[in-house]
Image (spheres, rainbow, N blue to C red):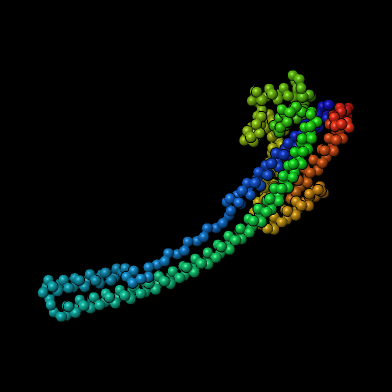
Amino acid sequence: MTTTNMKKYLTDVLGREQVLFTLNSIKNDINQRMHNIIHSPKSISAPHPPNVPATHKGSVKHEGSYALFIIGILVIFICIFAGLFNSVFWGIGLVVFIAIILFDDAYERKVIAERKERYSHDYNNYEAEKRRIENENERLKEEQAAELMSLRTIQADVELHINKTQSTLEALYALDILFGKYRYFVAVASICEYFQSGRCDSLEGHEGAYNLYENELRQNIIIGQLSKVIKELQQIRNAQYLLYEAINASNQIQQNIAIELNNINRNSIKANQSIINRLDDIKGSVDNSAKSSAMVEYFTKETANNSRLMVEINRGDYGLLFDKKGNVVYTSRQ
């Protein structure tokens, strides 16, 4: 295979690996959103009812009545110790006790009436707030049900594109150009970069891409684990530039699509139906790239790329053709 064909092949394989990475990340985001709706649905807590006040007789304590009671007792004791048994003083004491009874009874009725009125007002407010929250929770329940239905529809569409892209990638790997050990995102990105930068012009041999990749892994010049690459993305920019660019581009696509998914949350029923309709429009068609939806644009573009690559594989654009038995035939195509 010529160097030109090898560069094209590696670039196309890297592209499919990047798309799979992006689609699986979108799928994970959608799955997490669905999990949150199912297991942690949004709802507003019900209000607490007001405390029922004490309204029985004797429930009101009043300092004024206690004061009058003490005054009455003092008057009696003064009369006793002073030897004043005049009916006038006893009359004063009796008046004081009668005043205590009348004042305390009137005050208690007034306070109890105020308590009942305040409780009635608070309870009416509680009932109104309770009805408002019940209506709001019902609205949230309907919106989340609509959102969940839409997310399931989008999830199915993402799965469809994952399967199509996976099939295209497997067809590229089935050409048996790249050794099985290096058929993963990180390795393909590095090997592609070696060819694109001119550091290598062959896969095998002492100065080949395989050997260079292994050496850089051993010397910790590059990172081989995708999970670690994601955590240390900025650190790999110089040593693994193509991988850095591919993941950055993927992250941007994910962010744009996440914004659309957030819009579903804010206006579930209308937004969901809009996106479902647009996703339905692109199934089996690639003529909707002018749509405003980042999700639709991305899916449409990658549907076209998968179709194009399958045509190129069968046409022999990588310098390989197949005989009638399906065996690879090397050609001189440049």
Taking the image as drawn, is residue 115 in sight? yes
Residue at the far top: name it.
Answer: 206
Q: Give how far across and how far down residue 243 sits, in percent.
A: 70, 33
Residue under the image location 75 percent in, 51 percent down: 279
Q: Give how far across and how far down residue 126 sits, in percent.
A: 49, 65
Q: Nearer the viewer, residue 27 or 163?
A: 163
Q: Give how far across and how far down residue 249 sits, in percent.
A: 71, 40
Left or right, 116 with respect to 290, comes to left
Taking the image as drawn, is residue 200 in sight? no
Q: Residue 120's quadrant in the figure?
A: bottom left
Residue under the image location 79 percent in, 44 percent down: 303
Q: Nearer the viewer, residue 138 or 112?
A: 138
Quarter holding the C terminus is top right
Residue at the far left: name it.
Answer: 83
Residue under the image location 68 percent in, 58 percent down: 269
Q: Nearer the viewer, residue 254 or 244?
A: 254
Residue 215 to residue 261: above or below = above
Residue under the image location 72 percent in, 45 percent down: 158
Q: How many marks?
A: 0
Q: Residue 76's quadrant in the figure?
A: bottom left
Quarter holding the N terminus is top right
Q: Give how far across and how far down residue 201 sits, in percent.
A: 79, 24
